[in-house]
Image: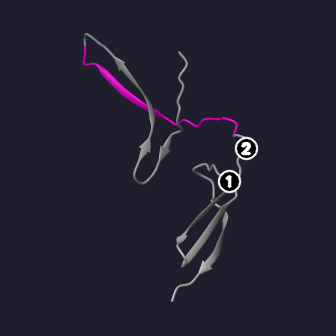
């Protein structure tokens, strides 16, 4: 039987996504044996060729406008976010 996992295994500070197989041996002459074996899943999919840059602008009207520009719109958990920050309007006293 083919096993398909939609998500990769993950271990973090607040959450964990794990896959395991539970094996149960039923015995009539002795207690049953139950064991779990954990395994790590990493999906080897081809990344999408289209990963455009993304821009976002936030601010306070007539006071502060900041524009963020990132080189990619999609990131992997192990990626480093690289981008630029532009201060378009600063009128703070």
User: Residue at image x 60%, y 65%?
Assistant: 57
User: Residue at image x 54%, y 79%?
Assistant: 63
| Foreground pick, 59 / 14 | 59
- Mark 1, residues whose alpha carbon is within 10 Å: few (<14), some, or many (≥20)? some
Gap between marks 2 and 1, in whole Å?
A: 9 Å
User: Residue at image x 55%, y 19%?
Assistant: 2
- Which residues fall within the magenta stretch? 30-47
Q: Residue furthest bottom?
A: 93
Q: Is residue 1 above or below residue 61?
A: above
Residue 46 is inside the magenta segment: yes
Q: Residue furthest front?
A: 62
| Foreground pick, 22 / 43 | 43
Q: Secondary structure at mark 1?
A: loop
Q: Magenta part mainly helix, strand or loop?
A: loop
Q: Which mark is residue 34?
A: none
Mark 1 sits on what residue? Answer: 72
Quadrant of residue 87 in the image? bottom right
Residue 72 is inside the magenta segment: no
| Foreground pick, 25 / 22 | 22
User: Residue at image x 41%, y 48%?
Assistant: 15
Q: Is residue 20 left or right of residue 76?
A: left
Find residue 43 and report its horizontal and vertical position in percent. Answer: 60, 35
Q: Is residue 12 above or below residue 82?
A: above
Q: Is residue 70 above or below residue 52?
A: below
Find residue 93 and report its horizontal and vertical position in percent. Answer: 51, 89
Mark 2 sits on what residue? Answer: 50
Find residue 32 and report its horizontal and vertical position in percent. Answer: 28, 19
Find residue 70 and report its horizontal and vertical position in percent. Answer: 66, 60
Quadrant of residue 37 in the image? top left
């Amino acid at each position: 039987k083919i096993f398909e996992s939609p998500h990769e295994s993950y271990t973090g500070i607040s959450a964990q996504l794990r896959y395991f197989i539970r094996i149960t041996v039923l015995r009539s002459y002795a207690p049953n044996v139950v064991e779990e074996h954990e395994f790590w899943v990493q999906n080897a999919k081809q990344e999408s060729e289209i990963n455009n840059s993304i821009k976002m602008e936030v601010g306070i009207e007539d006071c502060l406008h900041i524009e963020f520009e990132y080189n990619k719109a999609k990131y992997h958990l192990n990626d480093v976010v690289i981008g630029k920050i532009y201060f378009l309007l600063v009128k703070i006293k």
